[in-house]
Image: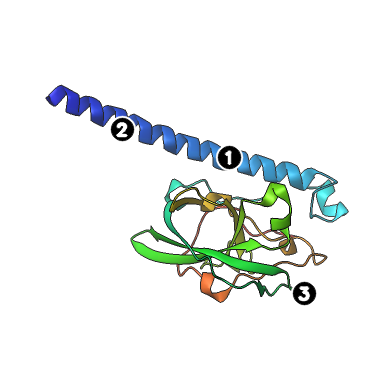
Amino acid sequence: MKFLLFLCFVISGSFAEAQVSKNVISAQNFQKEINMEFKSPEHSPLPLKARKNFSSLEFFPVDTTFIVIAEFVRTPFEAPFEMPTTTDRKPLYVKYGELYFSLNGKDFELDVYQSQQLNKKAEYKDYLFLPFTDLTNGNSSYSGGRYVDLKIPKANRMLIDFNKAYNPYCAYSGEYSCPIPPEKNHLEIAINAGVMAYEK
């Protein structure tokens, strides 16, 4: 019996280590992909001069502390609303649900949204938008907050990997119109993960 208990412990421990490794690799792949995008003439938000000298964005070190499992609560009867942006543009979003999670011993809540424009495209049917601000904004991260891309979960739990938090395009050029994270989505904690502030 003791042997079986030990075996169970070893297996579960190995599974946890494998999952951590998988999450780290996923975050590293995110960094590679976003750097490739920024180097691409077709997809980069960088002005031509900045793109010519571009090698890599600055990232916080990948930290699994900032990968959390959140309780997902669907809010199905929300009315579409115009989300403020950095320009006069007001795209339609709907609050899709609420995310409840703990980080460093504190409890937090974030609202997650669905774009009514992107929702019309088949490839974005399961896409959810998580804009947020935190205590790093204006210091080590972009002052206007950051975004995380999510997908509609099949259950009532959702993984949020803040190592995949990225800047709105407005951080790189004034030619873009970017959604402003709602005040409700401010985290009273420093999220030292994801893309850092861009030095122009």
Tell me the residue that label 1 is attached to. Answer: 28
Q: Which of marks 3 and 2 is nearer the N terminus?
A: 2
Image quarter in which the C terminus is found? bottom right
Residue at the far right in the pictured view: 48
Q: Which residue is drawn at 33% across and 61% down?
A: 105
State yes or no: discs 2 and 1 in contact (Cβ < 8 Å). Answer: no
Cα separation between marks 2 and 1:
24 Å
The mark lying in front, picked from 2 and 1, is: 2
Front-most of 115 and 161? 115
Can see residue 56? no
**Residue 12's disc number:** 2
Name which quarter of the figure residue 113 lies in.
bottom right
Dot 2 falls on a residue whose secondary structure is: helix
10 Å crowding of disc 2: few (<14), some (14-19), many (20+): few
At which x and y percent is residue 63?
A: 47, 47
Say what amino acid the circle numbered 1 marks.
Answer: Gln
Q: Name the residue under label 3.
A: 87
Identify the residue at horizontal 78%, vertical 44% (top origin). 39
- Type of amino acid under label 2: Ser
In this view of the protein, which residue sits in the foreground, 183 or 104? 183
Residue 184 drawn above or below residue 17: below
Q: Nearer the viewer, mark 3 or mark 1?
A: 3
- Separation of disc 3 and disc 1 at Cα? 33 Å
Image-quadrant location for residue 118? bottom right
Q: Position of residue 166 (x, y in %)?
A: 63, 55
